[in-house]
Amino acid sequence: MSHDKFVIDAGLKIILSHVKTALPNIKEVDCFSDGAASQFKQRFHFRNLIEIASEHNIQLSWNFFATSHGKGVVDGIGGTVKRLVWSAILAGEACRTADDFIQIAKKKTNKIFLVEITEDAIQKSQNTLENIFKNTKTVPETQKMHLVKVINKNTLEFRNFSICDPKKIVKYS
């Protein structure tokens, strides 16, 4: 029901755990998303990328598409899942909860990784991150940035474009 920084963290933990299980030797993950300020393109998410990279022992970067500039692959995947569930509902299946939705979708496809982000997972993220977020700095010109890269356990690099200079460095203590 929410799309805040704690939901994003809980979802990322699920996805990265799945990736690490499927590819145990993975060293680097490059993420791509739109620039939704309430979810991804904001100081708390930036700060959390350091925690995630450290927790999973990976190099991590996040690339932002220009906001409101077309649909991406994930929109198509989400649309496919919704269509599959909708067709099952039209055929008489009941879908009253998020878990019902996931179970129906899993019956209809095994090509898409589907999992529910539970309230417990979200609460666990909130409990873990609230302290870290208390002193999180605002990053100047956030909306201009299109790449955030974790450099080490307290440093992020920001670029307006993925391969451009100049870059901005933000350090956390």
Image: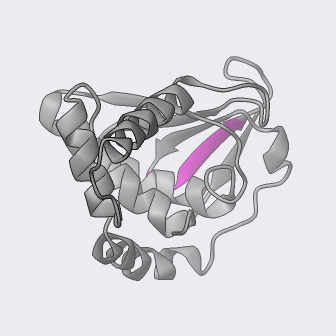
**Residue at 38% of width from left, 47% of height from top?**
53
Direction top: furthest residue: 163
Between 150 and 77, which is closer to the camera in this rendering? 77
Is residue 24 shown to the viewer in this render?
Answer: no
**Residue at 83% of width from left, 54% of height from top?**
140
Q: Quadrant of residue 91?
A: top left
Please give left or right for residue 145 compared with residue 71 in the image.
right
Between 78 and 150, which is closer to the camera in this rendering? 78
Between 93 and 138, which is closer to the camera in this rendering? 93
Range of residues picked out in magenta: 153-158
**Residue at 50% of width from left, 33% of height from top?**
79
Model colouring:
one colour
Between 91 and 22, which is closer to the camera in this rendering? 91
Answer whether residue 156 is magenta in the image. Answer: yes
Answer whether residue 52 is magenta in the image. Answer: no
Please give left or right for residue 45 compared with residue 117 in the image.
right
**Residue at 56% of width from left, 62% of height from top?**
3
Q: Quadrant of residue 33?
A: top right
